[in-house]
Image (cartoon, grey):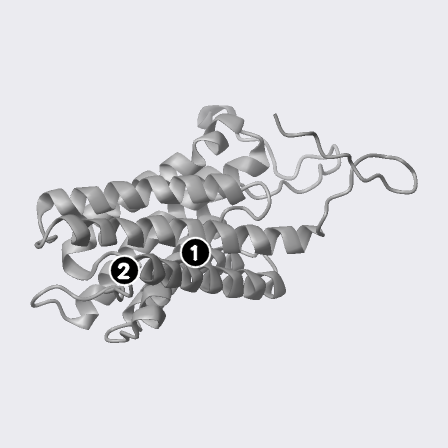
Amino acid sequence: MLPTRFPTRGADGAGPEPLLPGASRAVLSEFVATAVFVFAAEGSVYGLWKMFTDTGTPGGLLVVAVAHALALAAAVSLAIDASGGHVNPAVTFGLLVGRRISFARAVLYWAAQLLGAVLAAALLRLVSGGVRPMGFTLGHHIHERHALLLEVVMTFGLMYTVYATAVDRSRGGNGNVSAIAPIAIGFVLGANILAGGPFDGAAMNPARAFGPALVGWSWRHHWVYWVGPLIGAGLAGALYESVVAEQPEPPAAAATPTRLPLPAEDY
């Protein structure tokens, strides 16, 4: 058994102090979580390439979808306490639109997520003997406008799930819902991959697309995987905050009623 680390106490002896400030721990968590997610997600594609010549089969699609779902659930779980477990620049943007995160911290999260994705893709290329990641491509007879709309819709569903399970309910103290947030987020990602994977790969995450694109140097249609997820996440964040999320109640007014009571016949 590993020895317990001796806690470093402050001058007042109040308790252990973290090794890094809160913002630094959050940024590091986003970096590590995104690297873990992209390595496992893109690695599932590498594994299919290694075992099968034709990976464009229903079985291959199912394997990739399950791998993405499990990897994202794990990545969100390992970072949710430190940073909220965004693991996705589009999710960070949706929370920025909803005013749940400051712009300065959002920029730090974006940098950490992109660097984590690049590191994961570079490691995959290294351990595979120099095989370049394919990244994301459009399916046959799929135009960029179709892929853009698909990414908007799928990321909207992903972002709405994040809000409903990990963001809004955690404020209200509903621990049962917050506890299943990583699983729910992973499930909706996997389901969307089953639905949209044959059409455009179903990224829903600019970092997930950016890492393999940079390491493999493949930028064709790459803008779709930025614009679509950002629009979808921004719409979901704005809708949830303005319509669904519970607004703080105004302070109690004086004892005088604010409106006249309804007549008896209207009850």
The residue type indicated by label 2 comes to Glu
Residue 231 vs residue 118, the one in the foreground? 118
Look at the picture and state if 135 lies above or below 18.
below
Residue 145 vs residue 245, the one in the foreground? 145
Quadrant of the rendered image containing residue 219: bottom left
Q: Position of residue 49 (x, y in %)?
A: 17, 54
Q: Position of residue 28 (x, y in %)?
A: 58, 54
Q: Are marks 2 and 1 in contact (CB under 8 Å)?
A: no
Q: Residue at x 46, y 43 (%)?
A: 76
Q: Residue at x 34, y 69 (%)?
A: 215
Dot 2: within a 10 Å radius of its alpha carbon, few (fewer than 14), some, or many (20 or more) residues?
many
Name the side, left or right, on which 206 lies relative to 45.
Answer: right
Look at the picture and state if 105 lies above or below 163.
below
Q: Residue at x 92, y 38 (%)?
A: 12
Q: Residue at x 8, y 49 (%)?
A: 57
Quadrant assignment for the N terminus: top right
Residue wearing tag 2:
151
Q: Is residue 87 visible?
A: no
Q: Position of residue 124 (x, y in %)?
A: 34, 58
Look at the picture and state if 103 lies above or below 62.
below
- Badge 1 marks a residue whose secondary structure is loop
Q: Is residue 119 visible?
A: yes
Quadrant of the rendered image containing residue 173: top right
The tag earlier along the polypeptide, 2 or 1, is: 1
The residues tagged by marks 2 and 1 sit, at their Cα atoms, a distance apart of 14 Å
The residue type indicated by label 1 comes to Asn
Residue wearing tag 1:
88
